[in-house]
Image (cartoon, rainbow, N blue to C red):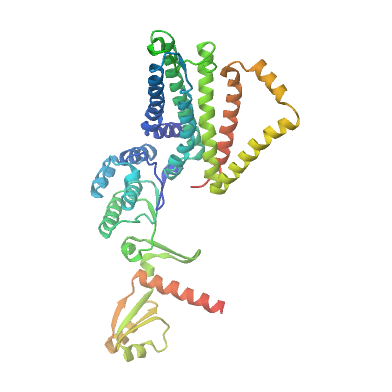
Amino acid sequence: MLRRICFIKESQKYPEAFRIQDVLATAAALFPNWDSAFAASLAEDFRLPLRRRMKKLSRGMLSSVGIIIGLASRAELTIFDEPYLGLDAVARTLFYDRLMQDYTEYPRTVILSTHLIDEVSALLEHVLVIDEGKLLLDEEADALRGRAYSVAGNATKVDAFAQGRQVVHRDTFGSLATATFMGRVDAEIRAQAHSRNLELASVSLQQLIVHLTGANAQRKAATKQ
Amino acid sequence: MNRIAEVFRMQLRDKFSWLLLPWIILGSSFAVNLLIAASQPDTLVTGGLTSIFIYYFVIGIVVPAQTFPFALGMGIRRIDYFAGTSLVSVAIGALMTVLLLILSVLENSWLASWGVGLSFFDVPFFSDGPIAMRGATYLALFLLMFFSGFAIACVYRKFGRAGMYALIVLGIVVTAFTPMLISYYDLWDEIGRWVEANIHSLNDLTPWAMLFSALLALVSFGLLRRSTV
């Protein structure tokens, strides 16, 4: 059972005396679907010195080793728990790209826990949001993307639009305002926004989650008072 | 079984710690003793051989810290980790035993005490009796050392720093009170007579070493089974 699962966590420890190639060889022997060629190409992409000992690796390199194990293991269930501590944006993008590429060729279940929601939002199929141990959200990513919208434009016009609607978030910038609403964009909303000369935009997953958890925190504060 | 073999192979990827370092340590002890023996006319009987056994205690402490979290992270079960690692300790212990016996036979025969009257590999009390008996004794001692270290490391894995403190306090209490109690009940004479009658060489302690190794192994596994990483 365990060999069908690969769990890569941010704090994974490695034997200090092992070289990267020792770690990869161990993983290769343990995961039945391991793809050595893929692991080698990933190591090259992440520019890992295969002969260097784990003790001497930087934080980012350690994360890269974990990512390589997670991807090359091709385990039926792969769990990445914050896998990219110390990795720069280029390396993270490389991770997302390779993950998507390999996933399309070898479909499997990948669970990715992260704080960088915007970066991964394009990859996600299903989203769970956990806030202080409570499950806040459990939904298909596509359904979620349409769950909120925002309008931007002249502040008074935005306020007029907001009449009778629940505003989850409001930003002002001079005479301009942006307001975020829950719900789907339908023809009526589109027409109203258009007639008021307001710009209609979708809300990113990250913003949506910020609003959701923010609202939750406020509620909690209120109940405490 | 396959998984146990994988743990075995994983441990031995660190060839330096298992195969080289013990001989570097023993070798440096030997070099020093050889110099001393050569610089004076008398024959020299030394206890330098103990260094390799002490190293095996150290490796018992080091191994879980280095490989246990990694092995679990790679989806290895605790029981397979324990079995594979124990097998490595037996295999390397046996290998070292054989090499030490060969060296002791050589030292006693055509190496002629290295030409300087040095008894390093063949020492009284340590190397008595038939060769098979000595082999069993060395192996039992290696395992006792390894599992003593391993058990300590497992206490740390399970109970962390608090466990170490408790173990140290326990150690102090036992070493302080045992002689006190022996004195109180006036048992020193009796113990002395028993040792004189029963313990003539290290071989006489071999059954005890085996028993304690097995106990420590059991304790280690019990702790490891419940420890998290």
User: Which residue does the image show at 54% across and 33% down from the upper left?
Assistant: B148
Q: In which quarter of the image is residue A165?
A: bottom left
Expressed as whole percent of the image width and height from the top left, the position of residue A184 reads: 37, 76
Residue drawn 51% across the image and 47% down it: B228
Residue B47 location (% of width, % of height): 48, 22
Residue reaching furthest top? B110
Residue A185 visible, this angle: no
Q: Can residue A219 be seen in this view?
A: yes
Residue located 44% across and 74% down the image: A214
Tell me: B43 left or right of A51. right
Say if A108 sits above or below A163 in the image.
above
Determine whether A96 is above or below A180 in the image: above
Front residue of B24 and A152: B24
User: In the image, is residue A154 above or below residue A52?
Assistant: below
Task: Name the spot of residue A171 as percent of width and height, x first.
Answer: 35, 82
The residue under the point 56% across, 46% down is B159
> Which is nearer the eye, A112 or B90?
B90
* B12 lies above or below B49: below
Question: How many numbered callouts?
Answer: 0
Asked if residue B187 lies left or right of residue B154, the reply is: right
Instruction: Report x, y in % for residue A218.
Output: 48, 77
Query: Camera-side residue: A28 or B203?
Result: B203
Q: Quadrant of the C terminus of chain A?
A: bottom right
Q: Residue pushed farthest right?
A: B185
